[in-house]
Amino acid sequence: MTIVNIDDLRLAAERRLPKLFFDYIDGGSFSEETYRRNREDFSRLALRQNVLADSAEPDLSTDYLGQRRALPFMLGPVGFLGLYSRQGEQKSALAAHAAGIPFCLSTFSIASLADVRKATNGPLHFQLYVLDDRSLMNELLAAAEDAAAEALFVTVDTAVTAVRERDVRNGFRSITRVTPGLLASFCRKPGWLLDIAAGGQPSVRALEHRADFGKGALEQAANLSRRIDKKLSWNDIARLRDRWKRQLIIKGVLSPEDAEKAKSIGADGVVISNHGGRQLDGAMSTIAALPAVRAAVGHDFTLMLDGGIRRGSDIIKAIGMGADGIMLGRAYTFGLAAKGQAGVAEAIQILEREVSITLTLMGCGSIDELKKRRSHFVFRQHATAQEGIV
Ligand SMILES: Cc1cc2nc3c(=O)[nH]c(=O)nc-3n(C[C@H](O)[C@H](O)[C@H](O)COP(=O)(O)O)c2cc1C
């Protein structure tokens, strides 16, 4: 099939993956209202068209998370990449680094931090779920230091895991081992099955020394998700701030008050995120939440944004509304599931091309110029340019 955009990669992923995994990636929580809002609210924003501006080949490099990066977006943390394609974490990191952008490894990964670091020397970040098993959490933090992770993203929007109804119907949460029915569904996706089977039974590398988490990725995942600390508070985050000396980013903030708290306990930034519409259904979209958060924290505090990014224009709109950088979730995961490392590279290239064309047609020479004149370039569809929000 011809792949033109991210939606095409999504369809290709659906073809290659067992339904159980495709639905896990694609779905949101409950009525999937927030999941849809994340996409819909981008279309309420308009881009300024400026002509005859000689802005072909705009410069897409920009600063976020303390460094100059080749592109204004990076690969965010997505659980179990190694179940969608063998060595999926390493492949995603390699594709990101080839494009000059960072990769953030999830706590819920098949590969360990050391595995990913062995595969590539590029910019690596680690996403942490605070675990009630503090010794395991300390091991993960030490591994992140050893692997030279630049920043720690602490995810805070999962006090409880919301119900993702597609997963319930597929039995995703209750499966801890491969049953005959599951095996039959796997056999209907031979391309995926042969790829995964070639690596033997997948298991979570960081848990291999912990027999109490069980055997095999499905059982380990079920046990690990039970260990996410449900009583996590701002005090715990403050303690983590003392423990982790490099950049600390709080992932999963939507309100200006929470962003201000994150700033006041010494975090280096936040990710405006609703977990891709997978947690609080009914929450506002991230793009709608962004302007008030930016207004609350001022201009020197790092704001990343994720949620519903499927087009280059989404990236430009989010930066226009105040984000420093963007994190991809499903967009690159669909690429990985469809075609492995080449699919992640393709997702990055598709978005890069769309960002470049869009900036050119806006008469904007670079992402940095967009950041300097945000409200000039991006504004609410039904407002005048002057009413655009910086
Ligand atoms: C399959 C899947 C697994 C995810 N796993 C994690 C995770 O382990 N840790 C985390 O902080 N966020 C996780 N997320 C959330 C993403 O980091 C991100 O917030 C979300 O995907 C952004 O929305 P988008 O996919 O619509 O771009 C996951 C998202 C998906 C789709």
Image (cartoon, rainbow, N blue to C red):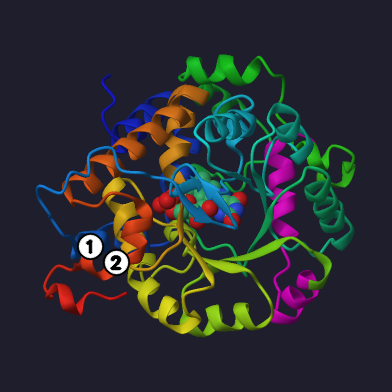
Q: Tell which residue pokes out farthest to the front in this image.
A: 54
**Position of residue 293 measured from the top left corner of the image (x, y, whole percent):** 44, 77
Closer to us: mark 1 or mark 2? 2
**Position of residue 65 measured from the top left corner of the image (x, y, whole percent):** 58, 57
Amino acid under label 1?
A: Phe
* Residue under the point 75% across and 38% down: 112
**Position of residue 170 measured from the top left corner of the image (x, y, whole percent):** 48, 42
* C-alpha span from label 1 to label 2: 7 Å
* Residue under the point 47% across and 42% down: 70
Above or below 102: residue 116: above
State left or right for residue 348 relative to residue 50. right
The majority secondary structure of the magenta stretch comes to: helix
Describe the element under mark 1 as helix, strand or loop. helix
Above or below 243: residue 236: below
Above or below 348: residue 318: below
Which residue is disc 2 drawn over? 373
State left or right for residue 296 relative to residue 87. left
Asked whether 328 falls inside the magenta stretch, the response is: no
Q: Is mark 2 within 8 Å of ligand 1?
A: no
Quick one: quadrant of the N terminus? top left
Count neighbours of disc 2 (C-alpha within 10 A) and say few if under 14, some if 14 to 19, many if 20 or more.
few
State left or right for residue 162 relative to residue 377. right
Span of residues in magenta: 214-241
Q: Nearer the viewer, residue 87 or 280?
A: 87
Which residue is disc 1 drawn over? 377
Quick one: quadrant of the C terminus? bottom left
* Residue under the point 26% across and 21% down: 2
Asked whether 230 falls inside the magenta stretch, the response is: yes
Instruction: Specify whether residue 206 is in view.
Output: yes
